[in-house]
Image (cartoon, rainbow, N blue to C red):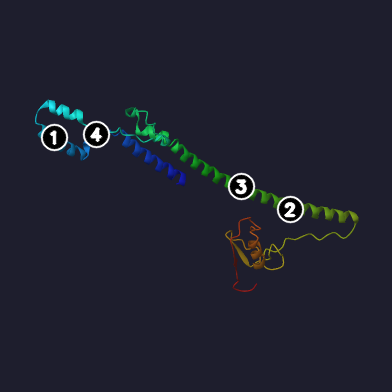
């Protein structure tokens, strides 16, 4: 989960808590608190002092100084309406949260889709690179075959000594230097086609296996139990 998603969830929780506080009426919250007991005791004391005379009670109520109106906080920046709107009964927590944190689920889904597309794009790049390397190897082999054929035809047309037919190098020799014996295994593909020195040189250049084009992660030197 990314930092933006965590901040969106935290913002949504804050908005829900504020919305619940706004929906709770002032009179109800006051009567449910300890203020109710204090109010009842005070009224009983005042009634005891004034007696049961309704006229004196009415005068006492009229003489009570009006309290200052409670100022509502402005939470418009968090998606709640300004203090001028008193239509709190028609506002639900779901609508306030949705207005404050828009498209949260859509953003999460979009993030997953973008991550999946990036992975697919990276995989396609690797496949294209492997295909490009394979095409280069094929073109190089074709050029070598064509050059050898043209050279042999030219020598034959001039009446000179024909070139000796090329023979494949023994598979016991290194495919890179063609001099040393292949005594090293390429990890992870497992091909034993190079000598230890050429294998280390290939790995230092981040080259690939000359047989299967697999990445070279390590060079393992092999030893024969007896000499041929």
What residue do we see at 37% from left, 41% from top?
Answer: 14
> How far apart, in angstroms, are the residues tagged by discs 4 and 3?
65 Å
Secondary structure under the numbered disc 3 in the rendered image: helix
Q: Which mark is residue 46?
A: 1
Secondary structure under the numbered disc 4 in the rendered image: helix
Mark positioned earlier in the residue sequence (4 or 3): 4
> How far apart, in angstroms, are the residues tagged by discs 2 and 3?
23 Å
- Please tell me whether mark 4 or mark 3 is closer to you in this view: 4
51 with respect to 207 (left or right): left
Mark positioned earlier in the residue sequence (2 or 3): 3
Instruction: Quarter of the image for the C terminus: give it.
Output: bottom right
Q: Which mark is residue 125?
A: 3
In the picture of the structure, the residue carrying the numbered disc 2 is: 140
Mark positioned earlier in the residue sequence (3 or 1): 1
Dots 1, 4 in contact, CB < 8 A: no
Q: Give the residue at the far right of this rendering.
A: 158
- Please tell me whether mark 3 or mark 1 is closer to you in this view: 1
Image quadrant in which you'd find residue 220: bottom right
Secondary structure under the numbered disc 1 in the rendered image: helix
- Please tell me whether mark 1 or mark 4 is closer to you in this view: 1
Mark positioned earlier in the residue sequence (2 or 4): 4
Dots 2, 3 in contact, CB < 8 A: no
65 with respect to 44 (left or right): right
173 with respect to 10 (left or right): right
């Amino acid at each position: 989960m990314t930092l933006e998603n965590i901040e969106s969830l935290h913002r949504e929780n804050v908005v829900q808590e504020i919305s619940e506080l706004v929906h709770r009426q002032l009179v109800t919250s006051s009567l449910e608190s300890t203020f109710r007991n204090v109010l009842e005791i005070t009224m009983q004391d005042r009634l005891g002092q004034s007696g049961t005379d309704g006229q004196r009670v009415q005068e006492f109520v009229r003489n009570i100084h009006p309290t200052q109106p409670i100022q509502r906080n402005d939470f418009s920046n968090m998606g709640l309406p300004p203090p001028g709107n008193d239509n709190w009964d028609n506002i639900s927590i779901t609508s306030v949260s949705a207005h404050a944190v828009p498209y949260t689920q859509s953003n999460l889904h979009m993030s997953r889709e973008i991550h999946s597309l990036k992975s697919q794009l990276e995989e396609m790049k690797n496949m294209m690179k492997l295909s490009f390397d394979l095409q280069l190897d094929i073109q190089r082999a074709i050029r070598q075959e064509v050059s050898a054929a043209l050279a042999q035809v030219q020598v034959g047309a001039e009446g000179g000594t024909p070139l000796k037919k090329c023979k494949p190098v023994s598979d016991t020799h290194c495919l890179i230097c063609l001099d040393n014996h292949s005594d090293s295994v390429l990890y992870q593909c497992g091909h034993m086609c190079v000598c230890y020195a050429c294998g280390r040189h290939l790995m230092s250049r981040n080259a690939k296996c000359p047989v299967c084009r697999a990445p070279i992660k390590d060079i393992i030197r092999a030893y024969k139990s007896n000499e041929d």
